[in-house]
Amino acid sequence: MTRFEKRYFVKFDFSDKQLGQYLTNALRDLEIALENERPEVKFNYSYTALIKGGIALIARIGKVKARSIPGHHIKIIEKMSEILQDETIKEVANSMRMKRNIDLYSGGIFVSDKESKDFYNFTEKVLLRIKKTIERNKAKESF
């Protein structure tokens, strides 16, 4: 069972509509990434979609909301990886997070076309797994 630290997560009673909106927003950002050819835009929207997908997964499975405090993206990534039982998610997502942080706080980055496409493809696969996990969990709850 996944444990959610109170420093980073707070119990929250989500409506089905709210839970659906989280995943919808993640998929919308992924669509923006797909439609844009600029590597930096594709990369940034892929990362945002990944984090939003993690928020949706955590909300559905853990019934918790991530607090917006320093380090919360790291915790979202860790919990997403833990719930989906895939360490690769933590490794690649943290690589994306660090690249994004360098871009924000250290004067920018260069993202190659290939790299942005690889990150997009990774995010797309993870979001499909999240969607399936959420649907399975929702079906279990309705019994």
Image (tube, helix red, strand yellow):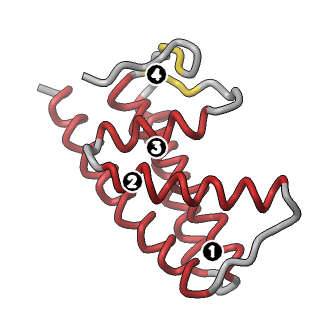
- 71 horizontally vs 75: left or right: right
Q: Amino acid at mark 2?
A: Ile
Residue closer to the observer: 119 or 61: 119
Residue at 55 percent of width and 52 percent of height: 25
Q: Are marks 4 and 3 in contact (CB under 8 Å)?
A: no
Rate crowding at label 4 as few (under 14), some (14 to 19) or many (20 or more) other CA atoms within 10 Å.
many
N-terminal of the two: label 2 or label 3?
A: 3
Q: Amino acid at mark 4?
A: Val
Circle 3: element type: helix
Circle 1: element type: helix
Residue 13 x, y percent position in the rendering: 46, 16
Q: CA distance from mark 2 to mark 1?
A: 18 Å
Disc 3: which residue? 54
Circle 4: element type: strand
Q: Nearer the viewer, mark 4 or mark 2?
A: 2
- 1 horizontally vs 11: left or right: left
Q: CA distance from mark 2 to mark 3?
A: 11 Å
Disc 4: which residue? 64
Disc 1: which residue? 42
> Relative to 55, does residue 122 appear above or below in the rendering?
below
Disc 2: which residue? 89
Residue 34 x, y percent position in the rendering: 54, 78
Residue closer to the observer: 142 or 27: 27
